Image (tube, grey):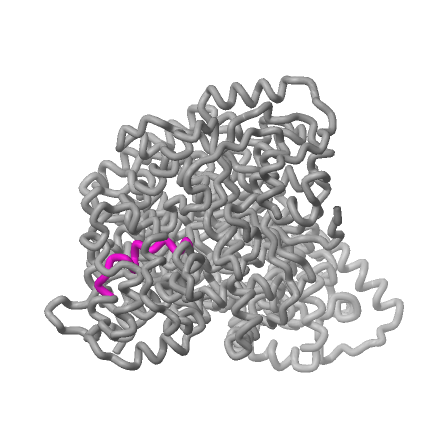
């Protein structure tokens, strides 16, 4: 009774979880919120997309993706064979357990009416499947915690997943081991299936089981004489063998039963098998109920992501892209392959902000998409992480879930940049990809964050803020810096300015650029920081080194400009974090 | 002619993923054809170039990590991008000249068991071709020539400057790239600003300025009578490709000049299948037709060494 109530409750939570999760794919979006993304429109677009894919040549792509990338996990294999091994073990093991063990009475009996869980080949297959899961989890733990090859961080989600999978299998094996040794189990079975036999034959049967199948019976100790065993064997074959293969075929449970033999009687007396049965059952139900909310939801979402992306191939209607991106957030398994190949992950050493690492950004994006209230500090951290990206798309290239990560970053970046939090990293070639994608950004949204960054980095024109004239420490830092230490050689000849392609681009450069290169050098000497940092020349500098190359005094003009840019930004950051 | 036997690690530029995958496929094909052994290293990260505006330390760390990785693998570094080349070279210079900075960076790299000691040589594809292998070596392997295609050679910035640090070609004007292009049977046209910036560094920051600079360069190349521009940097190629298209769309720019990467045309002359070189999709019909003609012409055999007296003068 309770058995069924628990099952129904777990299934109900599971179904509700799936519905909630799937609904978020249509309700939320990663990119900027637009009116075009109403739920009804997205549902229709999704149905059209699915229909279009199933009734066209794309079905072939779907089939091949399903076999290669979902079943065979080709993307994982390509990147890391050890991870592939771990994942294959867990996933093949779990699939086998699900069909042969969980659904035995619903599925297997239809094909094999004489089915019994203790009969071969089921006994052996179940054992092997469980063993595969254990091996897989062991390799996963090794990779994550011991081997040097795996850099990414481990979250609570990862640990929960490992514990849940481990707990199901371990409780299963322990249960099996306890049952193998259980005398009360033997007795009730014997009563049921060998009730007609006399006491002497029953003892022979029990002796046979003690000798061969690991049963622990306190009154019966070997060595048994040959006649008893022959008699026991005959009884076994008559009464038990139809449903019972040798317990040794359950090799893990049998191996575990050996060390517990000394305490087996005590465990049997305490009805240990009964409690373990419940534990195993309830843990499994908990797993089922928790699945849609845990990392294990990737069992559903990752195959979906792989297949959807195989036919959308980066394109698709905007409504479908928004839906796909929400699905992709759920498809991430936090495996860390992206972070391992990330082009800027190394800067984490300079900026300790986990949002720089692609695998860690996903969690922040989930919060952002779900409309969680985040304070400016959090938003700033996510924004820093997501703008500090060269858009090289190596992350997307190696993602085993086929997530189009670069597109995901792009959507999230454009959304964040509309929150009016100044982003100075846009004043660098990191903004190049955004410039290339200008056609995919609303014109008014494109310039807004740039204007804000220019304005803020220049300092407050009303004299507030730190960029006031006369600050000696900056000059000290400049002359000590590797880039700017040649500043004092400058004799303001303006050769730098005459070689500058940016200056040459304008009829009246001073109106557009503020201080020109030679004037900047001069102003630095005079410590006119407000003039220096408000000059557009700094941010229009190409870093082409024409000025530096042609300087008769060997002043590192370009490098000084770089240093000034660094200073302007770091002072602003200091101010914000103070 | 000296051929280096040391295997080389290919350094990938982040830019090539933005629709310039031909940069990787063609340079791979050319290197294989010339018998230059190279290794792919997945561990490399960004050279740090985009970070120079923001944080010198973050830039240096990025570059130094790559150098340390190559050092650990015992390989030299080969780039096909000017900006990667310039950034790695500059970082190498700083790490060698400033022991205190080197130790600070090494302390960070220690997290991964890496360390910069120096000794890795950072090379640009042009440097490998011109200096390590030499013009003659390449000339002997050519199966086709460009038949007098008028080429505006575009050096870009970070291949040349700061010259004391990168030291690829300190001539004024520079000649090494010209010599490599001329070896393919192209006609080098004189044009204004061959070593000026393409405009890419400020795209995304100040698009108007970026496009102004690109437009000016394209006009100069057109005035010089160029059939095409030739570049050795993905940033330059992007400006003269995608951004040129934008110029045509938004500014009625009416004197377009197609742009090709040096590996593409070198590959063509080495007899690599034209379909592998990504030439068709990129270029206007006139130029690709010319290149098709070159492909269909019978092989011309190894070229005789023809020294352009003017070039020799510059080289001295």
Vertical order, A168 against B241 (above or below): below
In the image, is B82 to the left or to the right of A520? Answer: right
Q: Which of the 4 image quadrants contains residue B135?
A: top right
Q: Position of residue B32 (x, y in %)?
A: 69, 40
Vertical order, A18 against A111 (above or below): below
The residue lying furthest to the right in this view is A226
Residue at coordinates 31% horizontally, 65% vertically from top-left? A492
In this rendered view, identify the residue nearer to me: A434 or B91: B91
Q: Is residue A15 visible?
A: no
Q: Which of the 4 image quadrants contains residue B277?
A: top right
Vertical order, B256 against A347 (above or below): above
Q: Position of residue A112 (x, y in %)?
A: 62, 42
Q: Is residue A539 magenta?
A: yes
In the image, is A570 to the left or to the right of A243? Answer: left
In this rendered view, identify the residue nearer to me: A74 or B54: B54
Vertical order, B266 against A380 (above or below): above
Q: Which residues are magenta?
A: A533-544
In this rendered view, identify the residue nearer to me: A336 or B150: B150
Q: Is residue A16 magenta?
A: no
Q: Split into 4 quadrants, where in the image is the C terminus of chain A?
A: bottom left
Q: Is residue B70 visible?
A: yes
In this rendered view, identify the residue nearer to me: A437 or B285: B285
Residue at coordinates 38% horizontally, 38% vertically from top-left? B217
In the image, is A376 to the left or to the right of B229? Answer: left
Q: Split into 4 quadrants, where in the image is the N terminus of chain A?
A: bottom left
């Amino acid at each position: 009774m309770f058995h069924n109530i628990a099952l129904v409750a777990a299934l109900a939570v599971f179904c509700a979880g799936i519905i909630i999760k799937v609904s978020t794919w249509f309700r939320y979006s990663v990119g900027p919120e637009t009116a075009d993304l109403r739920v009804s429109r997205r549902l229709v677009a999704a149905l059209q997309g699915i229909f279009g894919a199933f009734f066209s040549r794309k079905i072939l792509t779907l089939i091949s993706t399903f076999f290669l990338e979902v079943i065979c996990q080709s993307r994982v294999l390509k990147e890391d064979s050890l991870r592939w091994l771990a994942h294959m073990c867990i996933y093949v093991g779990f699939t086998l357990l699900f069909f042969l063990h969980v659904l035995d009475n619903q599925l297997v009996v239809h094909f094999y009416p004489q089915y019994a869980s203790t009969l071969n080949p089921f006994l052996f297959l179940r054992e092997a499947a469980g063993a595969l899961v254990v091996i897989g989890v062991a390799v996963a733990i090794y990779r994550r915690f011991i081997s040097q090859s795996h850099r990414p961080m481990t979250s609570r989600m990862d640990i929960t997943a490992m514990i849940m999978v481990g707990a199901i299998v371990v409780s299963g094996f322990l249960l099996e081991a306890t049952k193998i040794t259980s005398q009360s189990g033997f007795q009730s079975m014997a009563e049921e299936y060998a009730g007609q036999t006399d006491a002497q034959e029953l003892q022979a049967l029990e002796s046979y089981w003690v000798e061969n199948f690991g049963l622990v019976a306190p009154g019966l100790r070997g060595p048994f004489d040959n006649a008893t065993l022959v008699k026991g064997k005959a009884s076994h074959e008559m009464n038990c063998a139809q449903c019972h293969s040798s317990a040794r075929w359950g090799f893990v449970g049998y191996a575990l039963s050996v060390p517990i033999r000394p305490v087996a009687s005590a465990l049997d007396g305490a009805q240990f098998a009964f409690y373990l049965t419940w534990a195993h059952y309830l843990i499994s139900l908990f797993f089922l109920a928790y699945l849609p909310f845990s990392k294990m939801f990737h069992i559903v979402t990752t195959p979906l992501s792989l297949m959807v992306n195989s036919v959308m191939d980066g394109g698709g209607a905007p409504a479908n892209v928004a839906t796909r991106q929400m699905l992709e957030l759920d498809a991430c398994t936090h495996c860390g392959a992206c972070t391992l190949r990330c082009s800027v992950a190394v800067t984490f050493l300079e900026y300790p902000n986990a949002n720089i690492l692609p695998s860690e950004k996903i969690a922040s994006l989930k919060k952002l998409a779900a409309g969680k209230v985040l304070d400016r500090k959090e938003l700033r951290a996510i924004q820093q992480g997501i703008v500090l990206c060269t858009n090289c798309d190596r992350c997307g290239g190696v993602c085993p879930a086929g997530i189009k990560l670069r597109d995901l970053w792009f959507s999230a970046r454009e959304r964040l940049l509309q929150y009016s939090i100044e982003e100075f990293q846009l004043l660098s070639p990191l903004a190049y990809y955004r410039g290339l994608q200008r056609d995919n950004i609303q014109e008014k949204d494109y310039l807004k964050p740039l204007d804000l960054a220019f304005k803020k980095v220049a300092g407050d024109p009303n004299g507030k803020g730190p960029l006031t004239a006369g600050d000696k420490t900056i000059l000290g830092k400049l002359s000590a810096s590797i880039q700017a230490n040649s500043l004092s050689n400058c004799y303001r000849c303006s050769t730098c300015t005459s070689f500058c392609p940016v200056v040459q681009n304008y009829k009246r450069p001073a109106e557009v650029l503020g201080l020109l290169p030679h004037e900047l050098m001069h102003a630095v000497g005079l410590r006119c920081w407000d003039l220096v940092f408000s000059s557009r020349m700094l941010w229009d500098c190409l870093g082409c080194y024409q000025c530096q190359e042609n300087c008769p005094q060997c002043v590192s003009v370009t490098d000084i400009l770089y240093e000034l840019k660094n200073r302007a930004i770091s002072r602003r950051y200091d101010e914000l974090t103070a | 002619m000296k051929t280096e036997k040391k295997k080389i690690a290919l350094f990938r530029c982040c830019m090539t993923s933005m629709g310039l995958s031909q940069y990787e496929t063609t340079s791979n094909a050319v290197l294989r054809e010339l018998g230059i052994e190279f290794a792919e290293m997945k561990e490399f990260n960004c050279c740090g170039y985009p970070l120079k505006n923001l944080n010198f330390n973050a830039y240096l760390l990025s570059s130094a990590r790559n150098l340390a990785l190559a050092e650990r693998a015992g390989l030299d570094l080969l780039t096909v991008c000017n900006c990667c080349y310039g950034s790695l070279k500059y970082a190498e210079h700083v790490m060698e000249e400033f022991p205190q900075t080197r130790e600070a960076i090494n302390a960070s790299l220690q997290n991964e068991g890496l360390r910069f000691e120096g000794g890795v040589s950072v090379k640009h594809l042009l440097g490998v071709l011109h200096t390590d292998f030499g013009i003659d070596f390449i000339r002997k392997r050519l199966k086709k020539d460009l038949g007098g295609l008028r080429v505006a050679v575009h050096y870009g910035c970070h291949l040349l400057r700061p010259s004391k640090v990168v030291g690829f070609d300190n001539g004024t004007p520079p000649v090494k790239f010209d010599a490599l292009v001329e070896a393919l049977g192209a006609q080098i046209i004189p044009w204004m600003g061959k070593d000026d910036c393409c405009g890419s560094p400020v795209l995304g920051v100040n698009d108007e300025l970026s496009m102004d600079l690109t437009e000016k360069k394209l006009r100069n190349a057109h005035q010089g009578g160029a059939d095409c521009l030739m570049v050795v940097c993905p940033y330059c190629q992007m400006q003269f490709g995608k951004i040129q298209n934008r110029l045509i769309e938004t500014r009625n720019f009416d004197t377009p000049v197609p742009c090709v990467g040096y590996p593409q045309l070198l590959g063509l002359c080495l007899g690599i299948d034209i379909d592998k070189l990504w030439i068709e999709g990129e270029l206007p019909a006139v130029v690709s037709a010319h290149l098709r003609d070159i492909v269909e012409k019978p092989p011309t055999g190894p070229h005789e060494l023809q020294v352009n007296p003017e070039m020799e003068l510059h080289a001295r």
